[in-house]
Image: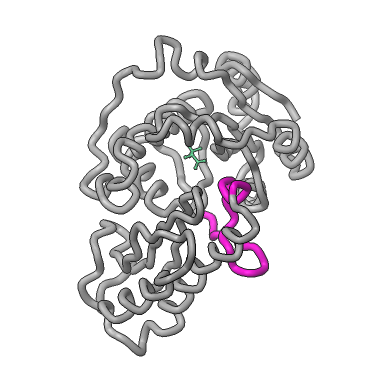
């Protein structure tokens, strides 16, 4: 497995591969890898010849500097996981490589109204930062395909909107959420959960599963009310939102006849903010 610190080195490696017609996949990550990330690598291997994984903790997408500071960076462990998974190359630039002038460089694109809903309401500017770095990574790799996890449902939508904005010919794959045996969605942030937080965090999966299992038994309003009730009285768990939304616009679903509905949730468990979702139809 090759490791690249600069865009130039990465481009030099990819140039002959592209010239010989190889399909290139990019798996962008911020490291602290888990089996969810490895499932992205595996799906990439089924659809491409050369897999590049990027590991870059992107400062411009953090709204809370403390969150950026405490973001886990177990780099040796990450590299071992990628090597085992058969990844071809890892791009691990420094901040100055991605933001040569300084990290406040201007970036603003129209991502549509959905940018300001759900996560966008709680993390102002987050998706501008995400799309800024993903565009830079796309420019560095110029992949044919790129893989993202469904767990960050809104992120995938924003990245697709960014692709449309720049008219980029990259096919996006959305990979299913990988869960622990007890249902908790895998996340790099789970490492911050204490033993009791870890138990309390199961409420996210349970409330989403309730909606899926009971979708035909109640109205949309009842389903959301009942799902929210799961959070009542659970110590150290604070619900930010639970919504059944239109998966294209992220506006609350207004009728069961709407296609592409998804239930999305965000909650703070102890000091860790978790998100999760389940596609309904
Ligand atoms: O999902 C992530 O890990 C990040 O938001 C991404 C897409 C790698 C951009 O920094």
From the top left corner, tell me how far across and down residue 63 is, in percent. 37, 35
Question: In the image, what residue occupies the spot 54% across and 65% down?
Answer: 200
Residue 280 location, quadrant: bottom left
Q: Is residue 129 magenta?
A: no
Model colouring: one colour
The answer, for residue 183, to whether it is visible in the render is yes
From the top left corner, tell me how far across and down residue 228 is, in percent. 36, 71
118 in relation to 138, above or below: below
Question: In the image, what residue occupies the spot 41% across and 77% down?
Answer: 211
Residue sitting farthest toward the bottom: 217
From the top left corner, tell me how far across and down residue 57 is, in percent. 53, 30
Residue 191 falls left or right of residue 172:
right
Question: Which image quadrant: the N terminus?
Answer: top right
Question: In the image, what residue occupies the spot 55% across and 36% down?
Answer: 71
Number of on-image labels:
0
Question: In the image, what residue occupies the spot 44% across and 39% down?
Answer: 170
From the top left corner, tell me how far across and down residue 92 is, in percent. 61, 25
Residue 31 location, quadrant: top right
Segment colored magenta: 175-192
Residue 87 location, quadrant: top right
271 in relation to 106, above or below: below
| Residue situated in front as seen by the camera: 105 or 136 | 105
| Residue situated in front as seen by the camera: 23 or 268 | 268
Question: Which image quadrant: the C terminus?
Answer: bottom left
Q: Is residue 181 magenta?
A: yes
């Amino acid at each position: 497995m090759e490791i690249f610190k600069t865009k130039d080195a990465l481009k030099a490696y990819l140039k002959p591969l592209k010239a010989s017609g190889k399909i290139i996949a990019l798996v962008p990550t911020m490291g602290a890898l888990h089996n969810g990330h490895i499932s992205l690598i595996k799906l990439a291997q089924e659809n491409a010849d050369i897999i590049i994984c990027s590991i870059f903790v992107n400062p411009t997408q953090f709204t809370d500097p403390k969150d950026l500071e405490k973001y886990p960076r177990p780099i040796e462990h990450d590299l071992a996981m990628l090597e085992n998974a058969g990844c071809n190359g890892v791009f691990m630039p420094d901040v100055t490589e991605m933001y040569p002038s300084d990290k406040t460089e201007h970036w603003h694109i129209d991502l549509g109204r959905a940018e300001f809903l759900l996560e966008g309401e709680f993390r102002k500017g987050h998706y501008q930062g995400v799309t800024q770095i993903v565009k830079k990574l796309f420019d560095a790799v110029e992949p044919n395909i790129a893989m993202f996890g469904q767990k960050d449902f809104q992120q995938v939508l924003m990245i697709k909107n960014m692709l449309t904005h720049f008219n980029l010919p990259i096919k996006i794959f959305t990979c299913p959420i990988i869960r622990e045996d007890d249902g908790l969605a895998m996340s790099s942030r789970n490492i911050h959960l204490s033993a009791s937080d870890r138990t309390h965090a199961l409420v996210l999966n349970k409330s989403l599963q309730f909606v899926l299992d009971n979708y035909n038994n109640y109205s949309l309003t009842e389903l959301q009310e009942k799902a929210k009730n799961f959070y009542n009285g659970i110590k150290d768990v604070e619900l930010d939102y639970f919504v059944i939304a239109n998966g294209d616009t992220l506006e609350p679903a207004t009728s069961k006849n709407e296609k592409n509905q998804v239930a999305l949730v965000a909650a703070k468990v102890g000091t860790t903010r978790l998100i999760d979702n389940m596609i309904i139809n």
